[in-house]
Image: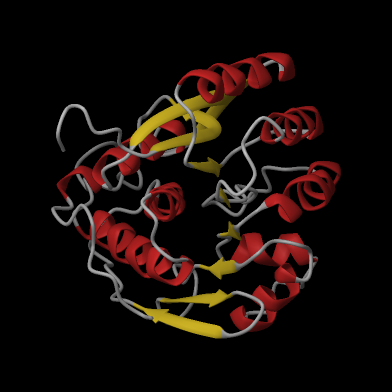
Amino acid sequence: MPPDRRPPVCLTIAGSDSGGGAGIQADLKAFAACGAHGASALTALTAQSTLAVTGVHPVPPAFILEQVRAVVEDLGVDAVKLGMLGGVAAIEAVAEALELVPPGVPVVIDPVMVAESGARLLDPDAVRALVELLLPRATVVTPNLPEARVLVGAEPEDVDAEHLARAIHALGPGAVVVTGGHRDAAVDILFDGARVVEMPGPRHPDGAAHGSGCTHASALAAHLAHGFSLQEAAFAARAVAGEAVRLGLRGVGGGAGPVNVLDVLARTPPRQGV
């Protein structure tokens, strides 16, 4: 890119992963891999490895707002990605911060609510705040299957991704992508209020998937910032996240290794699915 050409700016509002595999760190790497400049507003610091989260230190809500204001007023923002937000106070601060973002800027929400272990990361009050304050502001929400169930209060046996996507869409976002990592078939389901689109892809059992959800949502935001349509961006994000898992760093850490998005060579995957 010529030095005088401004790249799209993507802002991630999320928690930090001290192990570098997920959270803010994964988001910034995905933005870079997709040809966007990454900016960040931290909602929490975590003491985290590939094995566990051993501590969480929330960022004061007023400082979340200050971080977003600093980025918006100087750099401008072409897309926003929301990740781990924490409790009700942080969610309220993020909702206020989104008022600083110009209308029409895409907002991608990765509703980080359920850990890989199955543990709930948001209490019921925070889930309600997320649904009421943030989902109606979203261009697209990207839950995995367990997160989709939590958003709509579905029972664990409910594995119908299309049903869940439609139910989440009824809560107010512009579109929903239920990712396929927790399904028998690795197929993402996109519902935009008018049609359902299946986005199949290979499963990589020998890969490393820590940070895959963050990477997927960030790649989706970056492609929207580049001007891709929602469907184009969703297909591209599916491809980027899948390759990052396939190339994952299996030898890093004692648990699920981190994805490796920086080795994904196709920085702008071909447009498809239209």
Residue 50 appears anywhere in the view: no
Seen in the picture, residue 105 relative to 146 is either above or below; the reply is above
Looking at the image, the residue that sits furthest to the front is 4
* Quadrant showing the N terminus: top left
Q: Percent from the top left, x then y, of residue 221?
A: 45, 50
Q: Is residue 235 left or right of residue 213?
A: left
> Which quarter of the figure has residue 253?
top left
Horizontal side of residue 262 vs 139, given as left or right = left
Residue 257, image x, y percentages: 30, 45
Q: Position of residue 61 (x, y in %)?
A: 73, 20
Q: Nearer the viewer, residue 66 or 160?
A: 66
Left or right: 122 with respect to 189? right
- x, y (%) of residue 30? 33, 43
Residue ID at (35%, 54%): 209
In the image, residue 149 sits, relative to residue 97, either above or below, namely below
Between 72 and 28, the residue placed more toward the observer is: 72
Q: Quadrant location of residue 37?
A: top left
Residue 26 can be seen, yes or no:
yes
User: From the image, which quarter does the C terminus lie in?
Assistant: bottom left
Which residue is pictured at 36% across the width and 51% down the height? Answer: 226
Residue 250 sits above or below residue 190 on the image: above
User: Is 206 drawn above or below residue 219 in the view shown?
Assistant: below
**How many marks can you see?**
0
